């Protein structure tokens, strides 16, 4: 959730979009994510909702890496705020895993993680729950 929204903004960036378009995109994303969380909670109020944060897959490919990093961080901030409104919500950040080293962790498409990238994500998820950072450590 969020990766396609992020890519749409990055593609629009090349066309010099307006601030209003950014705000509209984030408002739409927030509405969609809130609806997804509400749907999950209505289907199973005890289910854990785990949101793995976004990373910037194109930071090494574009000159505007700082700007795309800022977009990812904003998506992550919004996502964390919404996910953590759920009593069973968990937000696990992974942006820092890929920061400045994504060329080693991305597949040949320079978008999806490679095996090592997925391994680092799995380690982060494992550490989140095994180190007691998770709010509900008893679910399986």
Image: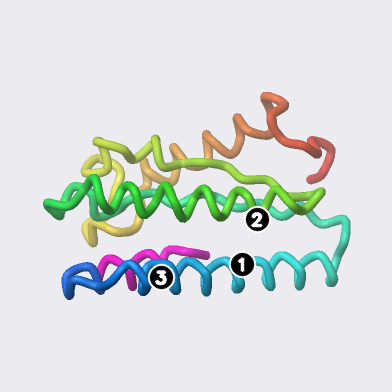
In front of the other: 79 or 56: 79
Please name the residue shown 27% across and 66% down the image: 10
Residue 93 located left or right of residue 48: left
Q: Based on the displayed image, in which of its 4 quarters is residue 129 positioned? A: top right
Name the residue tied to disc 2: 82
**Neighbour tally class for label 2: few under 14, some 14-19, many 20 plus, Cα within 10 Å:** some
Residue 132 located left or right of residue 96: right
Judge whether 111 appears above or below 125 on screen: below
Name the residue tied to disc 3: 4
In front of the other: 78 or 137: 78
Of helix, strand and loop, which one carries label 3?
Answer: helix
What label sits on residue 33 in the rendered view? 1
What label sits on residue 121 in the rendered view? none
Real-space Cα separation, disc 1 to disc 3, in angstroms: 13 Å
Q: Which residues are magenta?
A: 1-11
Colour convention: rainbow
Please name the residue shown 77% across and 53% down the image: 86
Of helix, strand and loop, which one carries label 1?
Answer: helix
In front of the other: 21 or 32: 21
Residue 47, horizontal then vertical, whole percent:
81, 57
Real-space Cα separation, disc 2 to disc 1, in angstroms: 7 Å
- Which circle, 3 or 2, is nearer the viewer? 2
Label 3 or label 2, whichever comes before in sequence order? 3
């Amino acid at each position: 959730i969020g990766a396609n929204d992020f890519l749409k903004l990055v593609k629009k960036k090349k066309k010099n979009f307006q601030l209003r378009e950014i705000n509209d995109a984030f408002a739409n994303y927030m509405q969609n994510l809130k609806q997804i969380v509400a749907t999950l909670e209505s289907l199973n109020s005890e289910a854990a909702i785990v949101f793995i944060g976004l990373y910037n897959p194109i930071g090494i490919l574009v000159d505007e890496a700082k700007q795309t990093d800022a977009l990812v961080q904003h998506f992550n901030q919004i996502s964390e705020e919404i996910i953590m409104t759920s009593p069973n919500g968990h937000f696990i950040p992974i942006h820092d895993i890929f920061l400045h080293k994504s060329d080693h962790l991305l597949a040949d498409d320079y978008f999806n993680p490679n095996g090592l990238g997925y391994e680092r994500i799995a380690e982060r998820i494992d550490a989140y729950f095994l180190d007691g950072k998770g709010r509900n450590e008893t679910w399986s």
